Amino acid sequence: MRWDNLSAPPDEGVPERAAPAAPPLPLALPGAIARTFDTPGFAGMTFYEVRAKSIINRVPGASRVPFEWTINPYRGYSHACLYCYARHTHTYLDLDAGADFDRKVIVKVNAGELVRRELAAPGWRGAHVAMGTNVDCYQRAEGRYRLMPQIIEALRDFANPFSILTKGTLILRDLPLLRQAAEVTRVGVSFSVGFVDEALWRSVEPGTPSPRRRLDAVRALADAGFAVGVLMAPILPGFTDTDESIDATVAAIAAAGATSVTPLALHLRPGAREWYAGWLGREHPRLVPRYRELYGAGAYAPQAYQRELTARVRMAARRHGLHRAEAGENRRLPEPPPKAPPAEQLTLL
């Protein structure tokens, strides 16, 4: 079964001020330990602690991403980004891709020890490992569970190259470890900042640090010697694809000391598609026809629209002194990216 690599942890090492949660366990996690926390930041959330059987995962061959291996210590996403492409993965655990994805987070409490064990395996060849590619490893839960220091320490000790993509300013907590790792291996750090409009941020990314706080973290990492790339993603049709929004965002990214900006248009996979479409229909019904035009044939906007966005971001990057960037450049590996999957025939609203 798709969740066979998960099991319940022993009831020990409980984070401070944790209490067993009342909600019943998901059918797919019969032995998990469910907890809630009495702090305001975790109101309405449930954490399911499990002991994973594996942690370094191979990326499916059909994926568009330019890396082969990932580590994801969490499933579910308190950032609550309406558009998150990983929403559908929650349905594998008999949870829904909407509110459950935002409020029910699976925590692989043994992630650190697993990483160390798998890096030591005879068959492991020291391949690059990407983190933050499914859900953010520096979401709020990381402040409680502290899984990333153990993971980074293991990667450092084995001199294994890795990269982190995040919206979470909590990464600054681990800056000393990142600097230690960078002394012995390649360490890539990227932030996701799709726009700087604070009203829109509160609406579509309510659980994340503000764009300005993320850019402050970019500056802190750059000042520490890291070449920080910014994934300008997603660019939202009808909201942040105007020349004014693009220029303001690129200007702020350049001012923060980023070395590159990589634009990516919104894509709407199943799960995210329905959740985002519901919000769009309630809050911005005038844009529904535009989204039907762009996403009526599949999860991705038409290539012509994507190329035009990329060209406009490149022009803004040149104006503000940033390096030219192709999609994914700040995390590109030597291997060529896999072929794009066939178009999906889906409907919007």
Image (tube, helix red, strand yellow):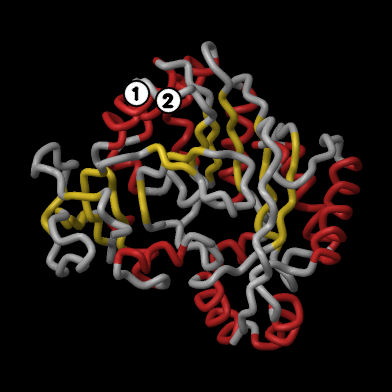
Q: Is residue 247 left or right of residue 26?
A: right
Name the secondary structure under disc 2: loop
Q: Residues within 10 Å of mark 1 (few under 14, many from 20)?
A: few
- Out of 236 and 88, give the one closest to the viewer: 88
Distance from the alpha carbon under mark 2 to that under mark 1? 6 Å
Residue sitting at 52 percent across and 50 percent down? 60
* Residue 115 x/y as whole percent: 34, 30
Q: Position of residue 330 (x, y in %)?
A: 69, 36
Tell me which amino acid carries mark 2.
Answer: Trp
The quarter of the rendered structure image containing the C terminus is bottom right
Compared to residue 49, the image places residue 70 above or below, namely: above
Write down the residue under mark 1: 121
7 in relation to 289, above or below: above
Which residue lies at the image location 42% right of the left edge and 72% below the top edge?
A: 98
Name the disc covering residue 124, or none.
2
**Disc 2 and disc 1 in contact, CB within 8 angstroms:** yes
Classify residue 191 by image quadrant.
top right
Residue 114 lies in what quarter of the image? top left
